[in-house]
Amino acid sequence: MNKSGMPASDPTKFQYFSYDYDEVGNIEEIRDYKLGDPQTGVPQLQSFGYDILYRLTSAGASGGYQGAGDYGPENYSYESTTGRMASKSGVNYTYNSGHFHAVSSLSNGSTYSYDANGNMTYRHVYEGGVWKNYTLVYDAENRLATVTGPVTANFKYDGDNKRVRATINGGLDTVFIGNYFEWNVTAGTKRTYYYAGATRIAMREGSGDLGSGRAWTQRISKTCSQERGEVRNPHQIREGVGVKDPCRTGGVLGG
């Protein structure tokens, strides 16, 4: 048994887990003392089962305080010849003939369609008590461009295939600068993310007038173009562009 975190009785600690493993290192049980009963100290218990190929065959959690985090039990089966998942908790999977690992339908009525490149183009799924249909369209680079259905969405990308703008239901409009910055044009709020190497370690939220999201990206692009003496697409903002040094990758955005 391995443990992680501190005793659940310490309210200042974020987590306290213990783990049990089988002889090959698969996790068999996870005890979550923070999700368990705070009065008795009995933890929530997650249990996992595996077949002889070490594929997950069962999973479930019980004992969470007032049901927090509990799920299942769920069971999984696999096709004997291909190894693909055959069922999950009694729902059977059927696969697309043109794309080996693409699910085309479920026994619960859900269906899915794909283009020649394997991108999902249509979903018929049961959500919120009703059946819903979604159509997904991709650009020439196989990037998701639009979604239509109960929810509509439009996405724009820069020359490095990074998403720079998302508009949801025609209203929620967000501009992205790599993994470091988000500007909600609709609400006028921003999020700045801070990293130690590749690991995100902090997020700061706030508000302020940066102008429109388009103007913001254009200002950064103009600064880079002037420094380098080159013409640059206003939306071609590389990951890591920051306020302190907007023309170099890997910089950290200021607030």
Image: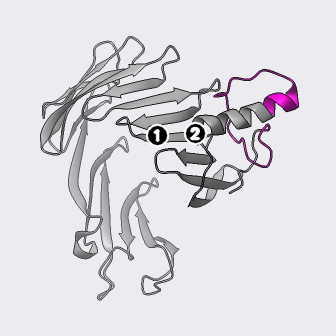
The residue carrying mark 2 is 213
For label 1, the crowd category at 10 Å Cα-Cα, with few meaning under 14, some 14 to 19 and many 20 or more, is: many
For label 2, the crowd category at 10 Å Cα-Cα, with few meaning under 14, some 14 to 19 and many 20 or more, is: many
Q: Earlier in the sequence, mark 2 or mark 1?
A: 1
Residue at image point 76% right, 39% down: 249
Circle 2: element type? helix
Residue 129 x, y percent position in the rendering:
12, 44
Residue 48 x, y percent position in the rendering:
31, 56
Count all numbered tags in the image, as a single digit: 2
Contact between marks 2 and 1 (CB within 8 A): the answer is yes
**Closer to the camera, 46 or 141?**
141
Q: Quadrant of the C terminus?
A: bottom right
Residue at image point 61% right, 47% down: 181
Q: Is residue 99 above or below residue 44?
A: above
Residue 232 on the magenta span: yes
Look at the image and give the residue range highlighted in magenta.
224-248
